[in-house]
Image: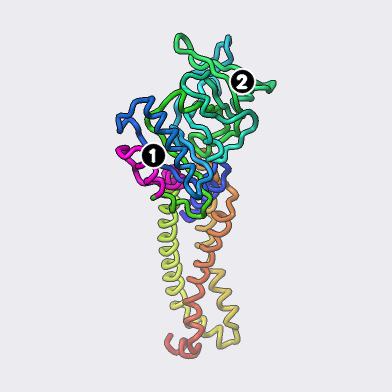
């Protein structure tokens, strides 16, 4: 149980240190739904532009943008994506990539590196030619020879198929889970495929982005006083739900492990105390004949550590097998985890040794002749 708690806890720490391709530091988010407001598409686009513009003017704001989805918030797909005149194979890797609707400045707001090309602009509107920014994996799959900028891609099939021009290649990121392998993904301008539900992303320069919450609510109210506004939250808080299962597993295993450790300590102490009490006369005779306290402690440790050592060995083997299974489904789990397979066994060994030594020390503090006379 302690090994499992160590694996989950250290795995969770490794996930937080993983490079997801986007940043959470200093980013505030506000969930907005224009459909709840009953706002028409044209009016909604005006609202979005005005909101981003006014938020960008706030002191301490370095970038502001809008997206239809948060990172790791699921997958939206428009069907297969291929080159014009070619047939895609449904179900093939990257054949039906996910996408996100974003406004200009989104990549700068989340720190997604622009490899080549340009960002979306206000000129990429509903009546402008369709454009897209694709990630590096998608660029390699569609254009293995390179030169993706300016090329056309076809989205969907049949009567609903349409083409888009690739204007940018951006760095790969994590889109559905932190443990996923590199996958094809693309971005399209929010203005070219409007979405009523959206998330305002704000990159702040201050050390505490939550100080911006009141100002963000004020700006949203100033642009439209009737739109529902949930409490602004940091991007890290918004994404914390994705770490909840592993966090609960870590805490649950750790609590059960600590409880089991306490039971083991009480059991080892109780058994050792009973054995030492029954051997008090023997220990007294040994001390009277010149045995040192260290030799007596060593004798009891050698005889009393067999059961804890066997249990520790079995627990390590079971924990190692558990790590091999969980490593297949969770990122950050390792069968050589130094915390789980180094620190945890050391804690167990220390507790077992102390539980063995303490009863012996109590006997050693007494007069050996008194122990002999009591027997």
Question: Which numbered marker is on residue 31?
Answer: 1
Residue 114, horizontal then vertical, whole percent = 61, 34
Residue 322, horizontal then vertical, whole percent = 50, 45
Residue 248, horizontal then vertical, whole percent = 41, 49
Q: Is residue 219 visible?
A: yes
Which is more toward the observer, 224 or 269? 224
Highlighted magenta segment, given as a residue range? 215-244
| Residue of label 2 | 142
Q: Is residue 246 visible?
A: no
C-alpha span from label 2 to label 1: 34 Å
Which is more toward the observer, 304 or 353? 353
Q: Residue at x 57, y 47 (%)?
A: 335
Asked which quadrant contains residue 184, the reply is top right
Residue 183 lies, with reference to residue 371, above or below; the image says above
Which is more toward the observer, 324 or 141? 141
Residue at the extreme right of the image, as rendered: 145
Q: Residue at x 62, y 22 (%)?
A: 141
Q: Which part of the image, by quadrant, shows the C terminus?
A: bottom left
Is disc 1 placed on a helix, strand or loop? strand
Q: Does 222 appear in magenta?
A: yes
């Amino acid at each position: 149980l302690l090994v499992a708690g160590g694996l989950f806890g250290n795995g969770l720490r490794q996930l937080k240190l993983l490079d997801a391709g986007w940043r959470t530091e200093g980013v505030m988010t506000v969930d907005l739904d224009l459909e709840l407001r009953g706002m028409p598409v044209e009016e909604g686009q005006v609202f979005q532009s005005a909101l981003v513009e006014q938020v960008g003017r706030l002191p301490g704001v370095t970038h502001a943008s809008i997206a239809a989805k948060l990172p790791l918030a699921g997958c939206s797909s428009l069907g297969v994506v291929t080159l014009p005149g070619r047939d895609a194979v449904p179900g093939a890797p990257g054949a039906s990539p996910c996408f996100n609707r974003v406004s200009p400045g989104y990549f700068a707001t989340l720190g997604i590196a622009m490899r080549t090309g340009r960002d979306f602009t206000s000129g990429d509107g509903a009546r402008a030619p369709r454009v897209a920014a694709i990630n590096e994996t998608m660029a390699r799959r569609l254009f293995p020879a390179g030169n993706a900028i300016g090329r056309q891609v076809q989205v969907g099939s049949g009567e609903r198929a349409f083409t888009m021009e690739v204007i940018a290649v951006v760095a790969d990121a994590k889109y559905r889970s932190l443990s996923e392998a590199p996958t094809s993904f693309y971005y399209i301008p929010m203005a070219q495929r409007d979405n009523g539900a959206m998330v305002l992303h704000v990159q702040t320069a201050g050390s505490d982005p939550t100080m911006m919450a009141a100002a963000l609510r004020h700006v949203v109210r100033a642009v439209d006083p009737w739109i529902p506004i949930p409490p602004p939250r940091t991007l890290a808080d918004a994404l914390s739900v994705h770490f909840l299962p592993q966090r609960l597993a870590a805490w649950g295993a750790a609590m059960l492990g600590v409880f089991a450790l306490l039971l083991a300590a009480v059991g080892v102490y109780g058994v050792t105390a009973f054995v030492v009490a029954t051997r008090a006369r023997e220990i007294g005779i040994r001390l009277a004949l010149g045995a040192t306290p260290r030799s007596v402690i060593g004798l009891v440790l050698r005889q009393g550590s067999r059961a804890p050592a066997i249990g520790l060995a079995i627990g390590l083997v079971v924990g190692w097998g558990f790590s091999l299974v969980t490593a297949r489904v969770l990122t950050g789990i390792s069968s050589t985890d130094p915390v789980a397979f180094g620190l945890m066994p050391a804690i167990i060994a220390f507790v077992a040794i102390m539980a063995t030594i303490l009863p012996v020390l109590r006997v050693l503090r007494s007069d050996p002749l008194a122990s002999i006379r009591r027997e």
